[in-house]
């Protein structure tokens, strides 16, 4: 397997592999363009998103500046809004459901590192996908850690660090984020 194939499969990989470095450079060049797009209309910026992302729904609005690793692992549903200065480290899939709203300075992280010092010394990394449901609200400055799933209609408080899954309809706040309110039974 290539390092890229390992990365996409969530296995240990070496990030400075030439193929991955080229993919990251392509994303960096795209970010240079996108992050100068403040004066473009939302539909024009949406077209730019389609150049890099895995999939982009209708009516998506990501306010620049925006930062990502590769872009092709990001899939965003209809009507999603990301405010200024969001970061998505997308070494594996990031799914964001329709009508989700994400505040400024939010970080969504899939990249992870071995806990074993010898493995880290070999420059190994791996990724765990992040899934955010539909109609979720994530407050400013929140951090979503690798492997987290956030259910539909959940609310994440500003500044929260989400280390565990959040059920649908729940409200989670704090560091680490804890569920303080459960969603209504359906």
Image (tube, rainbow, N blue to C red):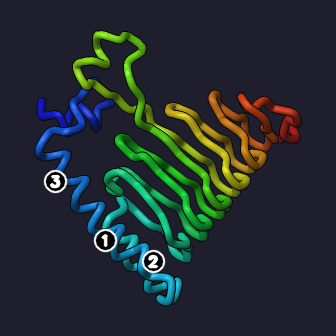
Q: Residue at x 31, y 71 (%)?
A: 51
The C terminus lies in quadrant = top right
**Of the image marks 1 and 3, the number of the one nearer the N terminus:** 3
Residue underneath mark 3: 22
Work out whether residue 155 can be spotted: no
Q: Is residue 78 above or below residue 93?
A: below
Residues under numbered marks 3 and 2 in contact, where contact means CB atoms less than 8 Å apart: no
> Badge 2: few (under 14), some or many (20 or more) residues near its Cα, within 10 Å?
some
Q: Residue at x 73, y 53 (%)?
A: 139
Residue 8, percent from left and from top? 28, 38
Decide which of 149, 109 is in the foreground and name it: 109
The N terminus lies in quadrant = top left
Decide which of 34, 147 is in the foreground and name it: 34
> Badge 3: few (under 14), some or many (20 or more) residues near its Cα, within 10 Å?
few
State how far apart marks 3 and 2 are (Cα).
24 Å
Element under disc 1 = helix
Identify the mark at residue 51; answer none if there is no mark: 1
Element under disc 2 = helix
Residue 147, percent from left and from top? 51, 31
Residue underneath mark 2: 46
Residues under numbered marks 1 and 3 in contact, where contact means CB atoms less than 8 Å apart: no
* Lateral position of residue 43 relative to residue 157, left or right: left
């Amino acid at each position: 397997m290539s390092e890229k194939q390992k990365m996409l499969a969530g296995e240990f990989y070496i990030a400075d592999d030439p193929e991955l470095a080229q993919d990251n450079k392509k994303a960096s060049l795209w970010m240079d363009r996108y992050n100068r797009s403040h004066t473009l209309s939302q539909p024009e910026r949406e077209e730019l998103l389609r150049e890099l992302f895995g999939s982009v729904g209708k009516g998506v609005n990501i306010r620049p500046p925006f930062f990502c690793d590769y872009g092709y692992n990001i899939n965003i549903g209809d009507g999603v809004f990301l405010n200024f200065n969001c970061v998505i480290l997308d070494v594996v899939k990031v799914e964001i459901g329709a009508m989700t709203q994400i505040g400024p300075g939010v970080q969504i992280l899939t990249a992870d590192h071995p806990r074993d010092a010898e493995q880290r010394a070999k420059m190994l990394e791996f990724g765990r996908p992040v899934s955010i449901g539909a109609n979720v609200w994530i407050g400013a400055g929140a951090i979503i850690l690798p492997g987290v799933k956030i259910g539909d209609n959940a609310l994440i408080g500003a500044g929260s660090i989400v280390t565990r899954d959040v059920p649908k309809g729940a409200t989670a706040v704090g560091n680490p984020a804890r569920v303080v309110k459960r969603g209504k039974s359906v």
